[in-house]
Amino acid sequence: MTSPAPDPLPVARTVAELKQLRPEFGGETVAFVPTMGALHEGHRSLFRLAAKHADRVVASIFVNPLQFGPGEDYARYPRVIDHDLKACAQEGVDLVFVPSVSDLYPPGRQVLVDAGQMGTVLEGAVRPGHFNGVLTVVLKLFNLVRPDVAIFGEKDAQQLACIKRMVSDLNVTVDIIGAPIVRETDGLALSSRNRFLSSAERRSALALSASLRAGARHSDVADVLEAARAHLAQTELDDPSFRLDYVDLVHPSSFSPVPSDHVGEAILAVAARVGSTRLIDNVTVQLTRPGSDGSAVAAGRQQPA
């Protein structure tokens, strides 16, 4: 006797279809995983974590034009919807929302969410307006999906901090959970953009996670930054296609630089361009006082391999 075929994965391709399908969950709790598609093992880990926090899991697949600036890779960002829907089905996602740009952003829109000061530093300085675009689409998706909890990857640490700030400041009734960074065995953080790297560029890209490991071996701000920057500077000398955007130690909640005598938790964040591909990475470190014994310890799950 053959087993019955699994139910097809429900997919809402318009806001109207989402409004029809979402009520079918009734009073069950909902965990939401927003994505831009090109799903990989990192995204799959978000779906699995979401399933532990709610009765139902909803995913969205939407390449958000508002978070791309002029000259960025919006046009070439990978769009592989059949692959993505298969991954969602395999991970037991209950509903996928795949809106069009015109449906999510109808003509005449005027209101955007402003990320504030936190949205102007590091990634926000390199990509002006990026976090305004992120927060605008996330808030719209929250309003449409109406989740109880939402899962975001810790690789985009500044994005996660901005979303937590928005939820707090605007009294959005969604619990935000960060998910650990998933890495390749050589330490490279999984990213949808990794597919754009040539073999040589991928080898250079390992400098990001290697610089984090180098920095995290030290216990105070100056030594952490010096070690990380030295490793990246050497990579820039060895590979002219490698161009560092920034490396810095920042407060986890505000992303402002930590003072030289900072004690406690900080995020060591790095971003660089390798050829035409831009990559980011980070590690959380626990700092002791300058001159004290011991080393900075990566806060568990984000430690680069």
Image (spheres, rainbow, N blue to C red):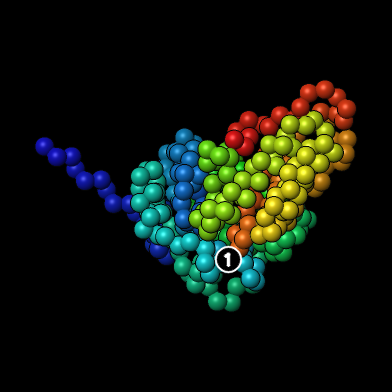
Residue holding disc 1: 73
Residue at position x 86%, y 29% in the image: 289
The image position of residue 32, as x and y in percent, is 49, 47
Q: Using the image, determine if residue 30 lies above or below residue 142.
A: above
User: Which residue is farthest left?
Assistant: 1
Determine the image quadrant of residue 227: top right
Along the viewing direction, whichever of 274 and 27 lies nearer the viewer? 274
The image position of residue 89, as x and y in percent, is 35, 48
Q: Amino acid at mark 1?
A: Asp
Rendered-image quadrant of the C terminus: top right
Rendered-image quadrant of the N terminus: top left
Q: Using the image, determine if residue 115 lies above or below residue 72.
A: above
Q: Is residue 78 visible?
A: yes
Q: Is residue 170 visible?
A: no
Drawn side of residue 50 relative to residue 252, left or right: left
Q: Secondary structure at mark 1?
A: loop
User: Which residue is farthest front?
Assistant: 238
